[in-house]
Amino acid sequence: MRLLILSIFSLFIFSACEKKIEDPLKSLQEKEIHSLNINLYPSNIKMINSNNNPDFAEATKDIKKLHVLQIQWDEESKKAAFAEWKSNQDFTDWESIFTARMNDADIEIKAPAGREDILYASADTKDGLFVGFLEGKFDISQVPALMKADLDLGPIGDFIQDKEKRKEHREKMRKMRESVEEEASQANSDSIQE
C-alpha cells in the first residue's frame, strides 16, 4: 500500500515539475506593433467551425488556448521590432515540426523538445505576419488540409472586419479634422494679413 501511495505521489510530483512555458507573444504584444490581438478558447474555436468541417473539429478538439497576433509590414520599424523580439526568444530547445510554403506564406510550427502540448507558429507573407502560441494539443497532420479549407470565421471574422472598418473610419475622420484645421488656420492667417 505504501509503495502504491509513494508511486502515485512521485508521479504527481514529476508531472507538477514539468517546465511551465509562458506565452512568448505577451512580450511581442507589449511592443504594440500588431494590428490584431486575439485569444481563442475552445468555445471560440468551435464558433470558427461554423461549416462543421470534421477535419477542423478533429484537429482542434484538444486546444486549450490559442493566442494570435497579426502584424502588418506597413512600416520598417515593425519589421525591426519583430526581428529584435525574435532574437530575444530562447527557441534553442524547440524543434521545428512543420515548415511549408503555401499561398505565398512561409509557415513554421515549433514545439519544445519532448512536448506536444505547446506550439509556436508563424505565417510570414510579403504584407505581414501571423504568429500564434497554442496551449493544448493540435493534430499537425491536418495543417495542409486546414490551409486549403474554406473556413468561415463567423462572429470572429465579423469582429475582425468591424475592427478594420472602425480603423478606416478613424483614419477618414483624422484626415477630415486635419483638413478642417488646415483650412481654419489658412483662413485665420488670411484674415490677419488683411
Image: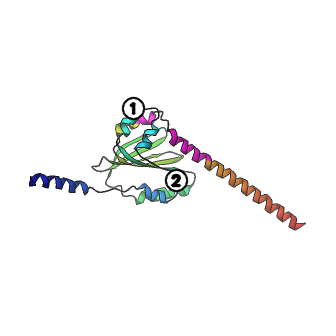
Q: Which of 95 and 140 is in front in this view?
A: 140
Residue that carries the numbered disc 2 in the rendered image: 34
Q: Is residue 193 above or below residue 90?
A: below
Q: How far apart are marks 2 and 1 (CA)?
A: 31 Å
Residue occupying the far front of the picture: 1
Q: Label 2 amino acid?
A: His
Q: Residue at x 79, y 58 (%)?
A: 183
Disc 2 or 1, which lies upstream in sequence?
A: 2
Q: Nearer the viewer, mark 2 or mark 1?
A: 1
Q: Is mark 1 on a helix, strand or loop?
A: helix
Left or right, 168 with respect to 186, comes to left
Quadrant of the image occupied by residue 20? bottom left
Q: Position of residue 73 (x, y in %)?
A: 54, 51
Q: Name the residue under label 1.
A: 54
**Residue displayed at 57% across by 54% down:** 75
Residue in the image at 52% along x and 41% along y: 155
Circle 1: residue type: Pro
In front here: 136 or 92? Answer: 136
Residue range in magenta is 144-165
Judge whether residue 59 is colored magenta. no
Establish if 30 lies above or below 48: below
Which residue sits at x=45%, y=36%? 49
How many residues crowd around disc 1 within 10 Å: few (fewer than 14), some, or many (20 or more)?
few
* SS majority, magenta: helix
Looking at the picture, how far across and down is residue 103, in whole percent?
A: 48, 37
